[in-house]
Amino acid sequence: MEPTIKAEGETNKRHSRQVSYNRAPLARRATRGPLDIDDPLSPLPVPPPKDTSKPVLSPVQPSPSITSPLSPNASLISLEEPIKDFTYLLQPEIYHPLSQIDVSLSFRTSPNAPAPDTTLPSLLSHGHFRAAASLAASLLTTPPLPTKPEDIFSLLYVRLACLTLINATALATQEARALDDLSSPFYRHPVTNAHLVPWELRVLAVRLQGLGTGDGKKVISGYYELGKDARAEAKKVKGTERDSWKGRLRDLGVRVASGLVEMGDLSGAGRHLKSLAEADMGAGEDPTMRGRLGLLYLKIGDLETARRYIKSSSDDDDQDASTHSAVLNPLLCMAEGDYDGATTQLTALRNAGGTPDPTVLQNLAVCLIYSGKLIEARPILESLVTAGQSFDTLLVNLSTVYELCTEKARGLKMDLAGKVAAKEGSGVGWEKTNAIFKL
């Protein structure tokens, strides 16, 4: 088919467009799309021209909703207003109910049990950690809900720490998953880049999240990530604040060694603590690190290395280091099978004057138990309970002595639970489970 070619002057009336020169242009209607947000850095809208023929009787006030990006109020608002939304941590399904089945009946019926309206600080100061964990979860999930990030993280730290203290670490590992990755930029301030989560919660969460995966290496790698952040923060500050960050670094170093011990890598923990001790000795700080090394090598079974570190700690001028060494020397004798020598040293420490250290008295009782002198060990442990001591190892050892001394041990152990429950709580943990009394 041949194409049709129109003449030069020919026009198509169906497609012709009549141009109007007298019609006013239509004003564009204001529209708002999904990308039109109130950005404080966006340019201000240009106001329409005003009619100058009308007199202005009062100065025009700027709109309160418009803030100039160069105004000092803009930066203040961006720093003071809530930056992140942490309300996802307020979901009730995150937190598990706590059962009291494993709690001894003497504590459940004790008049010293906390009242339902007891405040959270009072519960913590009196050692009611189970009740404190329940109250923290209730405050996180019951209206009025906390809105400030510092309040949310404070309650969450109390919850996880109390679960750890009552040996409910399995529940704590599950609840710590809600925090997800604390090293992500989501938990940092968008302007200052400061971390929004308190340091104590970050350290606890690293351990719980690592234990939840069953991989001890993840715990250690998390500690090293925190150490990198601590070094970066220490370089930014001076004076006492810098010393605080250095103390956190040393604490992380000890926690790494603890993680290696939990993994069963005792030799690796020894090498790590040795490097920490050498660094501290070079800086003239924390001489008790050598005593910790001695105790670790005692656990490993390397008695020669343990003796060297314990002796170097006892030769130090620091009073705390010398006292720590005096407590470790009897343990070295017990590791070598010299129970008589250990008994002599511990008896000397008990009679040194002043109030005897509960650790010294318990070690003396344990040494007497290994020597077969149960009749002498029993009153020492009972005197500690009468004096108000109720730490777990003391109660376990005394319950063991009751089992070895008589066939009516169950009655004695229930009486022991009643004595402990009759005492007012302190900061060491008032509530005890049946397992501690071997019931």
Image (cartoon, rainbow, N blue to C red):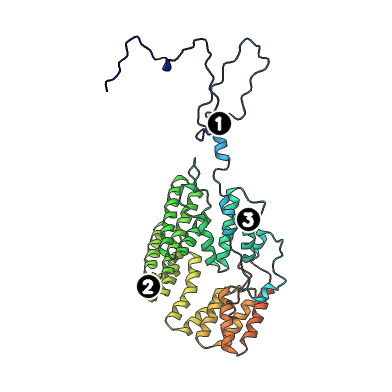
402 relative to 152, above or below: below
SS category of the residue bearing label 3:
helix
Mark 3 closeness class: few <14, some 14–19, many ≥20 residues within 10 Å? some
Closer to the eye: label 1 or 3 = 3
Q: Identify the amino acid type marked 3.
A: Thr
Mark drawn on residue 310: none
**Distance between the alpha carbons at the discs numbered 2 and 3:** 52 Å
Asked whether 417 or 44 is in front, the reply is 44
Mark drawn on residue 305: 2
Does label 1 or label 2 sit earlier along the sequence? Answer: 1
Q: Identify the amino acid type marked 2.
A: Thr
Tell me where residue 59 appears, x and y as whole percent: 65, 18
SS category of the residue bearing label 1:
helix
Quadrant where the N terminus sits is top left
Tell me where residue 395 appears, x and y as whole percent: 59, 77
Q: Identify the amino acid type marked 1.
A: Pro
Mark drawn on residue 141: 3
Reading the image, the residue beneath label 1 is 72
**Residue 239 seen by the camera:** no
Q: Quadrant of residue 297?
A: bottom left
Say if mark 1 contacts mark 2, CB within 8 Å: no
**Distance between the alpha carbons at the discs numbered 1 and 2:** 63 Å
Which residue ends up furthest to the left in the rendered image?
A: 2
Quadrant where the C terminus sits is bottom right
Residue 224 located left or right of residue 160:
left
Tell me where residue 152 appears, x and y as whole percent: 59, 52
**Distance between the alpha carbons at the discs numbered 1 and 3:** 37 Å
